[in-house]
Every structure is written in structure tokens, then in C-alpha cells.
Image (cartoon, rainbow, N blue to C red):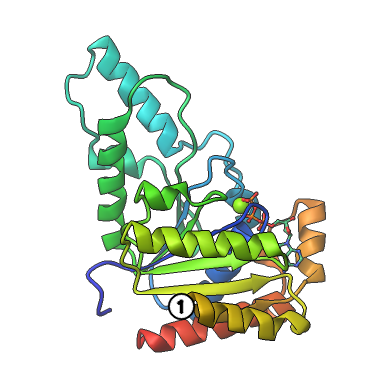
């Protein structure tokens, strides 16, 4: 690896555009290549990524739970140390066959978590140095950009569906990334559930926006069925159209980084 930390890919986009699906597909494609240790981060408080990856999150510790616990300890005076220990962050890393996952989750407590939040962000950054690849599934919208929670990211991968609103969201994400001066190595735009007639339009749009065109993931019956049955998307066949399209993008991306 030529990176100080693992190659970090943040997946973002409009609600329902396919962020979680794409994160699962990228993970699947990466695992098939067997290139190194992978950490996936579910940064969406809705915590859907586990379902897409076939992980039962029941009883598992999230980062939000750890922050809640720490805050209670600080508020009640049982802990005077306003920081988190590395071991505490590791509690929220779930080991799976072929990858690790960290679920950010949400916080139930009230009041200011500022110090704990920034410490947790620093810890996550430190964690990313221990893996070769980090995939982050963000929540819909782009507040995380203005809060700079994606600062440690090399690649920003914007997913859009076939709609004007998807493109508007894409534009806003790109503008915000420029505005807050986030230095991503690359920003890619991926079209999801798109038919080929939109390919040219998306390509032109990408050029106009100054982002790289990542290609399109077609509507995939296997994804639709898995979603309907509550089955893990990661288990769809590798020969499935969405898997093939994701692999193609991954190959291009890895080639660019000589990985
Ligand atoms: N290429 C595809 N073919 C068929 N169905 C798809 C495809 N991509 C996504 N879907 C379906 O669309 C729905 C939304 O996808 P997904 O959950 O990945 O979006 P999201 O951007 O993560 O949503 P949210 O903003 O709620 O987190 C899911 O039911 C998913 O199974
Ligand atoms: Mg999602």
C-alpha cells in the first residue's frame, strides 16, 4: 500500500439512491479480490447496512452506545476522564468473515457530546490506519460534509438515481465539498437503477460538474428480490448485472491507485 492509511471510500447521495446497496456491492467485489483488510462503517443512524450484509446487529454494541455510556459516566462523576480509550472504540467493531464492521448508530442521551464526538472521530481516523480499505455508508443528504466527518476520505462516491432531484443533490454535494474545501482525491458519480438511455446524460452531467463518471448500475432483479425478502444484498450472485457493474468500477478505481 502506498497510503498512510487504508483507501477510504465514502458513499453518499440522496435518500434511497442506493448508498447502502452500493456499499454492500463494493464490499462484495473487494472481498472477491482478496486485496487486504476491510473495514465497513455504517454511519447512517438508521443502521441498515447490517441487513444488506447479513449481520444480525441485535445485542451488538454501537459507537453511539459507547458514547452514551461514557457521557453517563462523566455526568455522574464515575469517570473523570473525558476521552475514550482505544479499547472502547474496538468494542463497537464487529468481526465478520472477510471484513470488520463499525456501526456508528445514534445517541439517546441529551446534552453536549462535542468532546466525545471529536475524540470518537479521531479514533475512527486512527482505526482507518489499521485497514487497507475502508468503506463508509453515509446517511442521506450531506451534513456530514459540512461537519467534516468525511475528512479522512480519499474518494467521495456520490450515488444518484434517475431523477432530477438526484442530480440536484449531486450538484449540492459537489458544491459543498468545494465550499468547505474538503480535499478528496477523487469525486465519482455513480448512477444507480439507471437504464442505458441515461448513460450519456449522466456522463455529460459528470463532466459539467467536474466529477469523475463511475458508470451505471442497472436495475437488478436479484437486488429487488433480496430487498423484498429481507435477504442480504451481499449474497446476490457475482454474475448479477449490479455485481458486474460494481466490479468494473472497482477495477478502474484500483487501477488508478495502482492497487
Ligand atoms: N440496482 C438496483 N436494482 C434494484 N433495486 C435496487 C437497486 N439499488 C437499490 N435498490 C433498492 O432500492 C432501495 C433503496 O436502496 P438503498 O437502501 O441502497 O438506498 P439508500 O441510499 O441507502 O437509502 P437511505 O437513504 O434510506 O439510506 C432498496 O430497497 C434497494 O434494495
Ligand atoms: Mg442506506
Residue 84 in which image quadrant = top left
- Between 87 and 9, the residue placed more toward the observer is 9
Q: Residues within 10 Å of mark 1 (few under 14, many from 20)?
A: some
Q: Is residue 219 visible?
A: yes
Q: Left or right: where does residue 225 sit relative to residue 174?
A: right
- Quadrant that contains the C terminus: bottom left
Residue at 33% x, 24% y is: 112
Question: Regarding mark 1 in the picture, which secondary structure is present there?
Answer: loop
Residue 7 in which image quadrant = bottom left
Compared with 33, 44 (above or below) is: above
- Between 89 and 18, the residue placed more toward the observer is 18
Compared with 204, 38 (above or below) is: above
Q: Left or right: where does residue 28 sit relative to residue 155?
A: right
Residue placed under numbered mark 1 in the picture: 210
Residue 62 in which image quadrant = top left
User: Where residue 171 sits in the image (x, y, percent)?
Assistant: 53, 64
Residue at 77% x, 72% y is: 219
Amino acid at each position: 500500500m502506498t497510503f498512510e492509511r487504508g483507501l477510504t471510500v465514502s458513499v453518499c447521495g440522496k435518500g434511497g439512491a442506493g448508498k447502502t446497496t452500493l456499499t454492500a456491492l463494493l464490499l462484495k467485489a473487494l472481498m472477491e479480490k482478496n486485496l487486504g483488510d476491510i473495514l465497513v462503517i455504517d454511519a447512517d443512524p438508521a443502521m441498515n447496512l447490517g441487513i444488506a450484509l447479513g449481520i444480525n446487529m441485535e445485542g451488538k454494541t454501537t459507537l453511539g452506545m459507547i458514547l452514551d455510556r461514557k457521557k453517563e459516566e462523566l455526568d455522574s462523576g464515575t469517570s473523570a476522564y473525558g476521552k475514550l480509550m482505544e479499547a472502547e472504540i474496538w468494542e463497537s467493531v464487529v468481526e465478520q468473515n472477510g471484513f470488520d464492521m463499525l456501526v456508528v448508530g445514534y445517541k439517546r442521551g441529551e446534552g453536549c457530546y462535542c468532546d466525545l464526538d471529536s475524540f470518537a472521530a479521531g479514533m475512527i481516523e486512527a482505526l482507518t490506519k489499521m485497514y487497507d480499505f475502508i468503506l463508509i455508508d453515509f446517511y442521506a443528504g450531506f451534513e456530514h460534509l459540512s461537519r467534516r466527518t468525511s475528512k479522512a476520505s480519499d474518494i467521495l462516491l456520490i450515488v444518484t438515481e434517475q431523477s432530477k432531484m438526484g442530480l440536484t443533490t449531486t450538484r449540492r454535494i459537489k458544491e459543498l465539498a468545494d465550499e468547505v474545501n474538503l480535499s478528496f482525491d477523487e469525486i465519482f458519480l455513480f448512477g444507480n437503477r439507471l437504464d442505458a438511455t441515461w448513460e450519456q446524460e449522466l456522463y455529460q452531467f459528470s463532466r459539467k460538474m467536474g466529477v469523475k463518471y463511475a458508470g451505471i448500475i442497472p436495475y437488478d432483479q436479484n437486488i429487488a428480490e433480496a430487498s423484498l425478502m429481507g435477504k442480504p444484498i451481499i449474497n446476490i450472485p457475482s454474475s448479477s448485472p449490479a455485481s458486474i457493474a460494481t466490479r468494473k468500477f472497482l477495477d478502474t478505481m484500483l487501477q488508478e491507485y495502482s492497487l
